[in-house]
Amino acid sequence: MKIHLISGVALLCLSACAEDQTPPAIEAEHPPEAAASEPAAMPTNATIVDTYFPRSRVEGAPEPLPQNPDTRLSDADMIFADAIAYAEETTSYGLLIWHDGALQLETYFPPHTEEVRSEPASMHKSVLGLVTAKAIADGLIESADAPISTWLPEWEDDPRGEITLRQLLTMSAGLAPLSYEGGAASPAVRFASGEDDTVETLLSLPLEEASAPHFHYQNTVSQLLMLVVTRALSEPYQDYLSREIWQPIGAADAYTYDFNEEGFPRGYASFLARPLDWLRLGLLIKQDGVYDGEQIVPAAAIANMTAPSATNPNYGWQIWRGAEFEAERYYNFEGVGFAALSSEPYLTDDLIFFDGFGGQRVYISQSEDLVIVRLGDSQTGWDDSRLPNAVIRALHAQD
């Protein structure tokens, strides 16, 4: 079953926050002048981004992908035929496969090209986790175990202020989710549609009743993490990301979809980057923070980010792990609601991945020297093990 992201409600979009609670202002981009109106087509992950304004540029410095041409496989289309077929079946925009020091496959499905910057959904969470790990390594954030009241003085004398940064990173903050009771007038929908103030809503989140720390995946937790990080940095998130990570890996310009003109970005979704640049991020993590021979992010920061958390062995710092097989991977400790599906265990026990709703993925395996990127339409029936296992089987067949 194929579904499309139709509006900010589907992505739990957030509204503008007060001026004194945002990072330093950066120049926002605005939509072009509207042309004569025509009947609107159903938006897809590739077309909905045309409505994303205001947005801010993450300045790139594009360079050729460093690779070894001598390790390129011949007849890649035939070798990876099963993976390509699944990508086509799931209405993908692009499929990229890195292995053995080279980009073995770079396929785009018409009308999409290498320049497509589609909605990646929650894959932005992993970028935010990486930025946080780098900021800790740079000494801009004292410790992952610091209480978040350090950056949220509003919670200085509040039990919620004792939540640690690590608990935000691992989705174990113990904050209650927004309610959908009331339909269009519910807190969750009002928050998603931008009717309510973003920061005010975040700071009003109550603690859950459960006493023990537990895993509960929520977009609002990632957005609270973004609020903490933007307050901890002495510059806009986009500028820090550009200088410290994005330009050093040779990526092209990317964009954040912001809540306001001051450039406060959605931290849980809507990081608009080319498929090839998502691959660069995967390589950076696979290579323990090294890119083209340079240590961009300390190896210890990558290890912290990708290690299993105390409340979920398949989750790190805003990034997923596939070490323990779950045919139905739920996003909360109760095992209810939406689940990501896998038809079989992964064929490698060190798989980690960026997970965006409906099959937006960056799969990474050090042992297989493998990075896979898939972007496309969102699929509620996406099979998480189908694509990486098809690629690994194809590679092992070449041995």
Image (tube, helix red, strand yellow):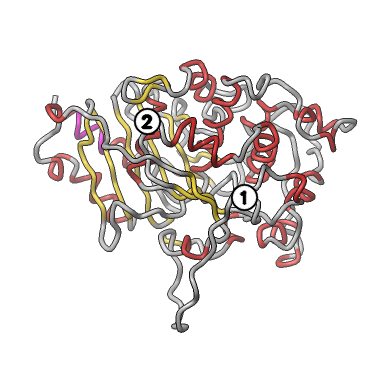
Q: Crowdedness of circle 2 by 10 Å Cα count: few (<14), some, many (20+)? A: many
Q: Is residue 275 left or right of residue 266?
A: left
Relative to 316, residue 266 above or below: below
Q: Which residue is mark 1?
A: 263
Q: Within the image, what quadrant is residue 333 found in?
A: top right
Q: Is residue 118 magenta?
A: no
As measured in the structure, the alpha-carbon distance from the residue carrying label 2 to the one carrying label 1 is 30 Å
Q: Which residue is mark 2?
A: 364
Q: Is residue 266 left or right of residue 57?
A: right
- SS for callout 2: strand
Q: Within the image, what quadrant is residue 376 found in?
A: bottom left
- Residue at 38%, 21% (x, y): give it: 290
- Residue at 50%, 61% (x, y): give it: 5
Tell me where residue 127 appears, x and y as whole percent: 51, 37
Amino acid type at mark 1: Gly
Near-viewer residue (338 or 355): 355
Find the magenta span and give its range: 390-395
Sequence-earlier tag: 2 or 1: 1
